[in-house]
């Protein structure tokens, strides 16, 4: 029988779960941009509200790390996981803000590949939200990081095809520059989800 001297305090797990649930809220808001007659300003503002909430969660997590005598697993890993979850939210907010500020939703339609990237992010967000509560037991996590990494590869393919479309001559040069910046944030969000999954794998291996 394996014994552990680490506490099973739930506050850290609850904060990770809340942060991941905010990522689901973020990708759901980005999916609204595909709806007809969407209020893009409202989507952008709500994304900012979710991002602010995520910042508060991250601050609570850091405060908890600094005040806890013993943590459920390595402090460095807790800090890294919290920071990486926050990074994902920052990228999601940037996508919504740029689409609004650049007026890109006034185009007849956004590129199909952009919606494909948002769909990948939505899947990654839901996987991550489902995985965070399982950190408490460190069980049934392997399928999560394998699938999240597979989705990141899928996102990379969609990103490359999006670049092909952007530089095909279909759009004017200024629109290409604007959409390239949005595409980079979408791709960065996919990568950030993978970083979260890789950190969870590292934690699970250490604690096994």
Image (tube, rainbow, N blue to C red):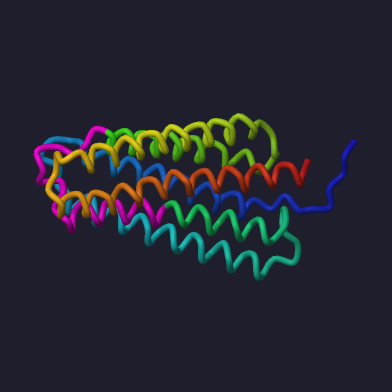
Q: Position of residue 19 (x, y in %)?
A: 48, 51
- The dominant secondary structure in magenta is helix
Q: Position of residue 37 (x, y in %)?
A: 10, 40
The answer to whether residue 61 is magenta is no
Between 111 and 99, the residue placed more toward the observer is 111
**Residue at position x 61%, y 61% in the image:** 79
The answer to whether residue 111 is magenta is yes
**Residue at position x 37%, y 58% in the image:** 51
Residue 116: quadrant of the picture = top left
Q: Position of residue 49 (x, y in %)?
A: 32, 58
Between 58 and 31, the residue placed more toward the observer is 31
Quarter holding the N terminus? top right
Q: Which residues are magenta?
A: 89-112
Q: Describe residue 175's horizontal placement relative to residue 76 as left or right.
A: left
Q: Describe residue 130's horizontal placement relative to residue 180 as left or right.
A: right
**Residue at position x 29%, y 43% in the image:** 30
Q: Residue furthest right?
A: 1
Q: Describe residue 22's horizontal placement relative to residue 142 as left or right.
A: left
Q: Position of residue 55 (x, y in %)?
A: 44, 62
**Residue at position x 15%, y 46% in the image:** 105
Between 13 and 154, the residue placed more toward the observer is 154
Quarter holding the C terminus? top right
**How many numbered marks, from 0 up?**
0
């Amino acid at each position: 029988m394996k014994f552990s001297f680490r506490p099973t305090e739930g506050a850290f797990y609850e904060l990770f779960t809340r942060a991941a649930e905010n990522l689901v809220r973020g990708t759901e808001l980005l999916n609204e941009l595909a709806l007809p007659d969407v209020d893009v300003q409202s989507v952008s503002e709500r994304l900012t509200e979710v991002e602010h909430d995520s910042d508060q969660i991250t601050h609570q997590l850091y405060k908890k790390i600094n005040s806890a005598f013993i943590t459920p697993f390595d402090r460095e890993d807790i800090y890294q996981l919290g920071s990486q979850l926050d990074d994902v939210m920052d990228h999601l907010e940037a996508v919504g803000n740029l689409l609004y500020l650049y007026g890109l939703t006034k185009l007849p339609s956004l590129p199909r590949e952009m919606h494909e990237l948002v769909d990948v992010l939505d899947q990654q967000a839901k996987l991550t939200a489902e995985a965070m509560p399982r950190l408490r037991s460190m069980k049934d996590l392997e399928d999560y990081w394998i699938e999240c990494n597979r989705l990141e590869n899928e996102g990379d393919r969609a990103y490359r095809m999006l670049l092909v479309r952007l530089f095909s001559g279909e759009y004017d040069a200024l629109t290409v520059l604007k959409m390239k910046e949005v595409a980079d944030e979408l791709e960065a969000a996919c990568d950030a989800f993978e970083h979260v999954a890789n950190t969870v794998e590292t934690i699970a291996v250490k604690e096994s």
